[in-house]
Amino acid sequence: MDRVMKLASERAVVIFTSDSCCMCHTVTRLFRDFGVSALEHELDQDPKGKEMERALIKLLGKGPPVPAVFIGGKLVGGTNKVMSLHLSGEFVPMMRNAGALWL
């Protein structure tokens, strides 16, 4: 869990993903479309990926562990939470507050 939290605090937005996860691509694309330069950490490319997957499941309280989005070092959640924030109009202000979006 320490490794996940350390990586999550490296940038304003950090997204834990997997190559084979289509929703990971959707979430990262949303951030890119808004001009947010998120740090993507692909668990299947990391030797400690399985260990981090288990830590993310504990943090999220359920599976799947990816995508897992951290904003300002805090866990926001997965696809459903990010899309809910976007649809409710809370996404852009959250990005601005984290310093990930300047406009």
Image (cartoon, grey):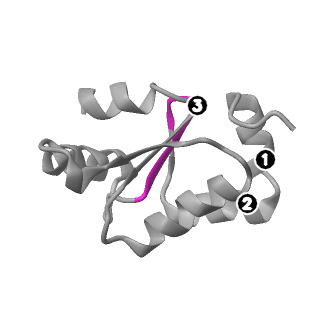
Amino acid at circle 3: Ala
Percent coordinates x, y for residue 46 in the rendering: 19, 45
Percent coordinates x, y for residue 61 in the rendering: 34, 54
Q: Is residue 93 magenta?
A: no
Amino acid at circle 2: His
Instruction: Name the residue: 22% across, 44% down.
Output: 52
Which residue is situated farthest in the bottom direction here?
22
Mark 3 Cα-neighbour bin, 10 Å: few <14, some 14–19, many ≥20: many
Q: Which residue is mark 1?
A: 92
For the record, the magenta segment spans 67-74
Instruction: Name the residue: 34% across, 25% down.
Output: 6
Q: Which mark is residue 86?
A: 2
Q: Is residue 71 magenta?
A: yes
Mark 1 Cα-neighbour bin, 10 Å: few <14, some 14–19, many ≥20: some
Q: Quadrant of the C terminus?
A: top right
Secondary element under disc 1, as helix, strand or loop, is: helix
